Image (cartoon, rainbow, N blue to C red):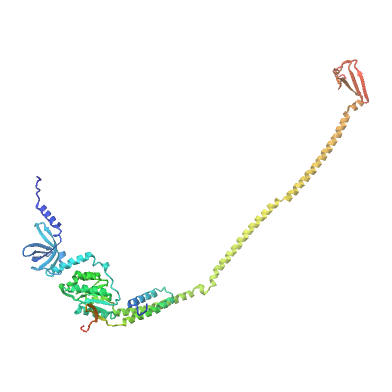
Amino acid sequence: MKEQRVLSIKELTKYIKMKLEGDSLLSDVWVRGEISNFTHHSSGHMYFTLKDEASRIKSIMFASHNQKLAFKPKEGMMIIAKGNISVFDRDGQYQLYLQHMQPDGIGSLFLAFEQLKSKLEQEGLFAPERKKPIPRFPKAIGVITSPTGAAVRDIIITLQRRYPMVPVLLYPVLVQGAQAAPAISTAIEQMNRMAEVDVLIVGRGGGSLEELWPFNEEQVARSIYASTIPIISAVGHETDFTIADFVADLRAATPTAAAELAVPHYVELRSQVAGLGQRLTQSVFTLAERRREQLTRLMRSPYLRDPMRQLVEPTERLDRLSEQLRFKMQMVLQRTRERTVKLERALSRHQPQERFAAAKNRAERAQASLMQSMLSIHKDKGHRLTVSIRQLDALSPLKIMQRGYSLVYSESDQKQTLVKSLQQVQLGDKLTIQLTDGRIDCQVWSMEEEEPGNV
Amino acid sequence: MSEQEQSFEQALAKLETIVQQLENGDVPLEKAIELFQQGMELAGVCGGKLEQIERKIEMLVEENGTLVKKPFNQESF
């Protein structure tokens, strides 16, 4: 068996506190009871006991919460309150910590109000983005209120005073009692069906919470929300807030204020129209004046006043440019001319006639020289021939033979051979001696050799 | 839309637009004069409408199951 754990008092109290604070009912609970042992401490906190016939509970309301109370809690007062249960550790005592408190009686209504308010708020009926704008110049105003009493009078008088041209359509309804809420709802729906007005004022004069109650009913709230015509709520006095006020497109503090919010002020409008008329005249004059100034300014423009002056600069520029053009053109021409001359010169150097003439000249000269050479060679050769002939003539054997010499030939093998030596002949050989004027045939019959050089 | 038909609000809005246009100053002169004439007419229309005071206050009364408009007695005020 598991050993039982022993808790300290502190731990036990902490556990109990945790349990109580974790409970959903106890963390947000409404109670009704009578105040007793009331103390408003110098710290601002309120300490008291809430009790009924059967039971009691220690209660605390801290200064931060009780400062907002609309009433003064007193000994013996019946209240309805909202708070949560927790434990005061030191005394081990559970207590009620209060956030809201209302005197009982109206307390139940208050509770219903709070509950409906939070419900509708969560549904988005109060959402600012759902609010319809109130037309600036309504064509007709619907009023849903009691046909008797201060509220309808205040509304109509105010509308008349501010904006007398607007038609008013009154939908008379009960504004208190059990029949009021359905009547108000029907009126809103009827007005929407008829669609004759473009703003609705729904409300009544001041009164007790019970008297204002129809304007806190869900039915009315839903009709206001469903209305396509924008609604200004005007319930009670400045301090009274109803559910209708939260749902309405615009909340007015009083019926008079609602009428003021519904229409512009006639006098203000008249001065506005007059002001616009003035501004219209003024602006068109200003505009014309500005145009005139513009015109004057334009007329003063140098372009209009002295147009020729505007041409001076471009003219100068033109001159300058033409000068440059001319100069550059001349440069180009000059260069081209020089080049042409150079080329012509080069060309003339290469002219074929001249080369031809030169060549012809050379050819002629060469021919002449050739002829010369030929003649010279011819002459020389002729000369040399004459000399040679003379020499030859001098050397001719005939001449020598004329001087007494003769030629001896031997005849062998049918061939004549000139005999220049003893060796060529033998005794008995027949020889032929050639003389200038004939031949002698002879035969060798003796030979005698001589010593060379003895001849 | 004829001048009778247009509401005070429309006339006033047009007048405001025209004044703003002219005050902005970037309107051609001929257009400005045209706008000025229109504006003056609109100002007249607006002024006229403001003078047309007819106290028309009616109350809805149920008769034989239908709602009927009846003049609302203001003498009690």
Q: Hey, which residue is sitting farthest bottom in the picture?
A: B75
The N terminus of chain A sits in image quarter: top left
Horizontal side of B15 relative to A160 (left or right) equals: right
Q: Tell me the residue at 21%/70% (across/down).
A: A221
Query: In which quadrant will I find the C terminus of chain A?
Result: top right
x%, y% of residue A143? 24, 77
Residue A185 on image: x %, y %: 21, 72
Left or right of A60 in this view: A362: right
Task: Report how many numbered discs are placed on residues in the image.
Answer: 0
Tell me: A394 left or right of A297. Answer: right
Residue situated in front as seen by the camera: B17 or A436: B17
Residue A114 visible in rendering: yes
Q: Residue furthest left?
A: A53
Q: Quadrant of residue A207?
A: bottom left
Asked where in the image residue A401 lies, by quadrant, the reply is top right
Which is more toward the observer, A318 or A133? A133
Q: Is A353 placed above or below A410 here?
A: below
The picture places residue A312, in percent across and down from the top left corner, at 55, 70
